[in-house]
């Protein structure tokens, strides 16, 4: 129970303050334990952080799987645009998504290689999930024949990245402006 509570508090602390700004002393105080009690459950800050990152990546992938499954009845344009909006909403409301984006874009320097490797693994899995959707849309004539499913998926991930950057630096309102402009140009470029 205590390890779970430590992770809950640490998630909020890391999402809000980043790796450098979060302290084990603050996490312990919020949990209601002494700092040294954290070491009963985790070897240190790095282990706690990486354990959380693994959990968060799994939750982010689960979000994608569930979103795609629950919205598979939509046309490809509605599905993808809705995905962007839903991800924006997750960032505004969910510490998991805040933590994921903050860490993906600003990993602690000593954990950089591990975080970036896992981040690219996440993007590769996302691309793999999107390609069959684009294959279906191409077969149905919804996407221009000159656009491969791989190209459409990679370009969509670039739109998603742009939204992530704006969420981190500009906030939700500016990100919506970026989503709408990027989406308009993206969809015009791939639709048949």
Image: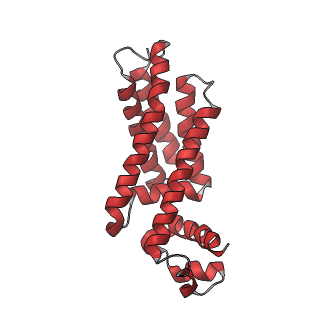
- Residue 30 appears left or right of 163: right
**Residue 6 x/y as whole percent:** 60, 73
**Residue 7 x/y as whole percent:** 58, 69
Quadrant containing the C terminus is top left
Q: Is residue 167 above or below residue 109?
A: above
- Residue 38 appears left or right of 163: right
Quarter of the image for residue 4 reads bottom right
Q: Is residue 130 above or below residue 118?
A: above
Q: Nearer the viewer, residue 150 or 84?
A: 150
Residue at horizontal 36%, vertical 60%?
A: 114
What sort of colour scheme is used for the picture? Answer: secondary structure
Q: Is residue 181 visible?
A: no
Residue at horizontal 56%, vertical 57%?
A: 96
Q: Is residue 159 above or below residue 133?
A: below
Residue at horizontal 66%, vertical 82%?
A: 32
Looking at the rendered structure, the number of numbered marks drawn on it comes to: 0
Q: Nearer the viewer, residue 1 or 177?
A: 1
**Residue 163 x/y as whole percent:** 46, 44
Q: Is residue 158 above or below residue 55?
A: above
**Residue 150 x/y as whole percent:** 37, 28
Q: Is residue 12 visible?
A: yes
Quadrant containing the N terminus is bottom right
């Amino acid at each position: 129970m205590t390890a779970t509570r430590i992770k809950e508090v640490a998630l909020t602390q890391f999402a809000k303050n980043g790796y450098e700004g979060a302290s084990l002393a603050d996490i312990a105080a919020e949990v209601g334990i002494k700092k040294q009690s954290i070491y009963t459950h985790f070897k240190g800050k790095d282990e706690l952080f990486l354990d959380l990152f693994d959990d968060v990546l799994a939750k982010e992938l689960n979000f994608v799987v569930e979103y795609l499954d629950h919205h598979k009845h939509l046309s490809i344009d509605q599905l993808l645009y809705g995905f962007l909006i839903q991800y924006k909403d997750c960032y505004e409301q969910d510490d998991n998504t805040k933590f994921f984006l903050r860490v993906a874009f600003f990993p602690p320097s000593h954990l950089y290689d591990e975080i970036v490797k896992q981040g690219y693994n996440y993007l590769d899995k996302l691309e793999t999930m999107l390609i069959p959707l684009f294959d279906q849309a191409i077969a149905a004539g919804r996407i221009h024949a000159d656009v491969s499913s791989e190209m459409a998926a990679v370009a969509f991930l670039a739109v998603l990245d742009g939204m992530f950057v704006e969420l981190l630096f500009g906030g939700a309102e500016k990100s919506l402006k970026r989503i709408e402009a990027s989406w308009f140009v993206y969809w015009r470029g791939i639709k048949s």
